[in-house]
Amino acid sequence: MNQDIVHVYFMPGMAANPTIFEHIKLPESQFKVHWLKWLIPEENETLKAYAFRLTKEIKHKNVALIGVSFGGVIVQEMSKLITLRRLIIISSVKSYKEMPRRMMLMRVTKAYKLAPTSLVNNMDMLSKYAFGETLTHRVELYKKYLSVTDTQYLDWAIKEMINWDQLEPIKDIIHIHGTNDSVFPYKYIKNCIKVENGTHVMVISKYRWFNAHLPKLILEGSSQSY
């Protein structure tokens, strides 16, 4: 029976801890869920070297790897190093060409260097940067999910996200994206599975959609061409 189990590894978004996946429930008769956590980057560590370190956390073969936002970028880099059954990204981008114009501008001007250090002690700014929303009445929600506030990590993560250089989408990748995503606007995204009214945090707010559709996507893939 265990041979039929598909091991599914989830990677959270920037600054988030894996409890963002706490409401995603996959049938236990078919899947075993594993949560990956952010590591603190080493000094001058490249994105590829970081991804290699994270592959050491994958303890099974032929797994499904799912990443959200910047975590989606990380799992794409990991997929270049290990053999996967399925690669799925949520609220993310498949190449730098899908990034919004403001990120492209930051890439050129290197304005991102001015932002990170102030994020750690400003939950409102951190939530806007990581989730694309300001706090309003969700202070406790963001305190719960945005727990990776190490300055070295934040500096590194923002720099690597803005400067990601992938030109073309990875073959057979499955991309799930919300139409109301404010971090990576839907208008810049090509060839994705569309979730109506989904925001950048839809893995939390629309978990029922994922519970309904992820099993089939993991087992059978998508009919869409990437």
Image (cartoon, helix red, strand yellow):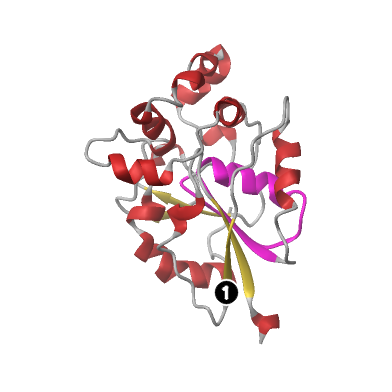
Q: Residues within 10 Å of mark 1 (few under 14, many from 20)?
A: some
In this rendering, would 127 be left or right of 57?
left
Q: Residue at x 22, y 40 (%)?
A: 137
Residue 18 picture location, percent across and down: 50, 52
Residue closer to the observer: 112 or 148: 148
Q: Quadrant of residue 51?
A: top right
Residue at label 1? 31
Q: Is residue 62 left or right of residue 156?
A: right
Percent from the top left, x then y, of residue 176?
47, 54
Give the extent of the magenta segment: 63-91
The stretch drawn in magenta includes residue 88: yes
Q: Residue at x 63, y 49 (%)?
A: 75
Quarter containing the N terminus: bottom right
Q: Residue at x 41, y 25 (%)?
A: 121
Q: Quadrant of residue 82?
A: bottom right
Q: Nearer the viewer, residue 206 or 225?
A: 206
Decide: is 52 above or below 87: above
Task: Note whether 74 is above or below 226 in the view shown.
Answer: above
